[in-house]
Amino acid sequence: MGTYWEKANHSWTDDSLRIINTPSKKSQKMFYYVQEAGHFKAFKPYYTERENLSSYLVKFTLAGQGILNYQNKEYLLNPGDIFFIDCMNYQYYATNSVEPWEMDWVHLQGNNVAEFYTEFMKNGSSRFTSENMRFHKIITNILTLQKNKNARTEYTTSLLIHELLNELVIQKNQLDFEEQDIPIPIQNLQHYLDLHFQENINLEILEKKFMINRYQLSKDFSKYIGSPPIDYLIANRINLSKDLLRYTTKSIKEVSIEIGIENIPYFCRLFKNSTGMTPNTFRKNG
């Protein structure tokens, strides 16, 4: 772990807001929590350059333009753009327009923020453009709570940060849809897998049956259902195997064959990879 360092110019307006928070020990153990948060209107030469800060930063651009250098990439930040970075890594961001760069921002931490960040960074980009003002609303609510603290503040702030993290992943991965928006072919495929998961099925079979290129089929199914078709099929098999192991006296071999897997050692490996236990251990602990 390197040494923390920072260089900065604080050319923000008098009506800008910055709140520094020292979370309780309980909050640090149990919750997501704010370290700092604010709403800035920052003129040139406003900038921050730093490294090795134990914090994650979310910054949402409302007006003007900013620039971000992070992980060997440069991003222009226009209204609607939001970035999510790990401040342990080197970062440089600054106002990049004549008018002030207006932004909401929050430094946050919590036990599994790193997992959200990893999911967010799946496509390698730290920035994306939001089509709505949900991030502004969430951060504004966080700021309001931090300005008017009471016994519920840490609990409620944790819920808002969790909402913020979920919204980052949902919007970045284009999961911001309603159930009725799921394409009919994907609904049909899901229904088919729910009914036939015990049968011998692979992507080639699904491609022919649904007359959709297997790669497109897998991509669309993952987008709307949350996992590729074969992973979804395997999850259904594992779910049934749990039921059979817990509520019947069938042997491991019988369970494996019933869920559609004739290779017993393969079933045992698959079950352990999915649950962390062998079928026998699961049955004994059930």
Image: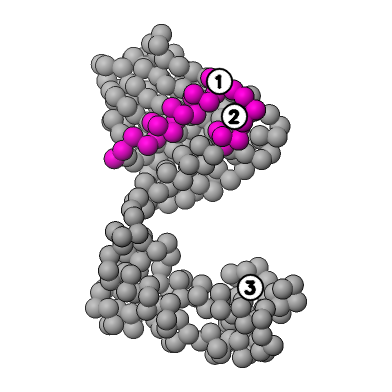
Q: Alpha-carbon distance for marks 1 and 2?
A: 8 Å
Q: Main secondary structure of the magenta part?
A: helix
Q: Position of residue 273 (x, y in %)?
A: 60, 70
Pick out the residue farthest to the top.
Answer: 14
The answer to whether residue 50 shows anywhere in this view is no
Task: Name which residue lies at 29% across and 59% down.
Answer: 181
Residue type at numbered disc 2: Thr
In the picture of the structure, the residue carrying the numbered disc 3 is 272
Q: Is there CB contact under 8 Å for labels 1 and 2? A: yes
Which is closer to the viewer, label 1 or label 3?
A: 1
Residue type at numbered disc 3: Lys
Tag 3: Cα neighbours inside 10 Å, few (<14), some, or many (≥20)?
some
Position of residue 206 in the picture relative to residue 50 (left or right): left
Q: Is residue 145 part of the magenta span, yes or no?
A: yes
Residues in magenta, as a range: 131-158
Tag 3 secondary structure: helix
In the picture of the structure, the residue carrying the numbered disc 2 is 153
Task: Name which residue lies at 46% across and 22% down.
Answer: 38
Above or below for 123 versus 276: above
Residue type at numbered disc 1: Asn
Q: Alpha-carbon distance for marks 3 and 2?
A: 41 Å
Quadrant position of residue 23: top right
Quadrant position of residue 188: bottom left
Which is closer to the viewer, label 3 or label 2?
A: 2
Q: Is residue 227 part of the magenta span, yes or no?
A: no
In the picture of the structure, the residue carrying the numbered disc 1 is 148
For marks 1 and 3 on the same chain, the one whose residue lies earlier in the sequence: 1
Task: Name which residue lies at 61% across and 91% down.
Answer: 254
Q: Position of residue 24 (x, y in %)?
A: 68, 29
Quadrant position of residue 109: top right
The answer to whether residue 13 shows anywhere in this view is yes
